[in-house]
Amino acid sequence: MPDTSSRIARPRLIEIIAALATGGLLTLMVLSNSMMAAHTTPLFSSLTAHGVGSVVAGIALWGVWLLRRGQAEPIAKRHIPLWAYLGGISGALTVIITSSTANSALALTGTLALGLAGQVVLALIFDVFGAMGIERRLPRKNDLIALAAIIAGTILIIFARGAS
Amino acid sequence: MALIILLAFGAGMLITLSRQINGRLAIETSALQSSFWNHLVGFAALAIVTMVAGSFWPEGAGGAPWFAWIGGIMGVAFVGLGSWLIPRLGAAMTGALLVAGQMLTGVVLDLARGQNTIIWMQIGGVILILLGVFISRKK
């Protein structure tokens, strides 16, 4: 039986670099998607992004399948519940909500700042209690300090843009 | 206003929820499969909304530059990598480091494009974020 009680570990360097690079990719993705939204609508922008993404991921999966053909099937893991396939609904809903709040009195700045708060609060709850079948993980003291510094820095940057 | 604040807060929570669900699927299958299902299911959901409220080919779609069409390609890598990170870093550190990377590159982009922002706040933000990333590595 693996240790499912909790896991307290320092992030590895490769994981931090991967996360930062992935965040950088998000900057480019937002740039592309908001360019489409400016030409059309936020809904169409998200629809095409998901459509293009489905095709690209589908082709990539097909490629992986071709490469691995003939190899032994991996040992079956846990039963996969239906909801595990539905993460995309939550993501789609986010687009609809934020495109309406960004045009409200909150503006983009308020939408981003509040969205960041919502993200972090739920993430901490998920980590502390364990959620969706991912092992619980109590944040270390340094994790919390790092979190606070990153959030404070992000809020500064968001408001630097909003105020100009 | 209270409702709008709640909605914006809730939208952030949905991002975390989506990442957690995709992370679970990635544990059982692979990061690429989780990204594929995320995009396909999201596309289906948005197609239903479009049928009710929007147009499948709004004015201006034809005039959009090529760069506006490739967000989805980056999305595949973004969701896949996020699903890979969640079980390793936990939800909070994954979210924080993604935002950190987004902000650092965002500031660089702002500077490169000569965007008019308040520079001392930007620099202060970058210093705080770098400090946070550094501290996350400490024992």
Image (cartoon, coloured by chain):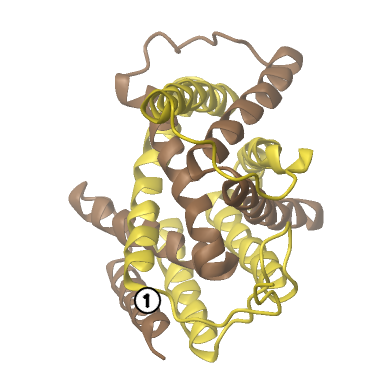
Between A161 and B97, which is closer to the camera in this rendering? B97
Q: Label 1's element?
A: helix
Q: Amino acid at mark 1?
A: Val
Q: Chain of mark 1?
A: B
Q: Say if B58 sits above or below B68 in the image.
A: above
Q: Say if A140 sits above or below B26 in the image.
A: below
Q: x, y percentage for residue B103?
A: 38, 60
Please give the name of the residue rendered at 67% of the width and 15% of the height, measured from the top-left corner: B54
Please give the name of the residue rendered at 73% of the width and 54% of the height, measured from the top-left corner: B10
* Residue highlighted by disc 1: B133
Please give the name of the residue rendered at 63% of the width and 56% of the height, measured from the top-left corner: B16
What colour has chain A? Answer: yellow
* B36 with respect to B6 (left or right): left
- Which quarter of the rendering shows the C terminus of chain B? bottom left
- Residue count near mark 1 (Cα–Cα under 10 Å), binned few <14, some 14–19, many ≥20: many
Between A64 and A155, which is closer to the camera in this rendering? A64
Between A38 and B55, which is closer to the camera in this rendering? B55
User: How many labels, in total?
Assistant: 1
Please give the name of the residue rendered at 41% of the width and 27% of the height, measured from the top-left corner: A60
What colour has chain B? Answer: brown
* B103 with respect to A42 (left or right): left
Between A61 and A68, which is closer to the camera in this rendering? A68
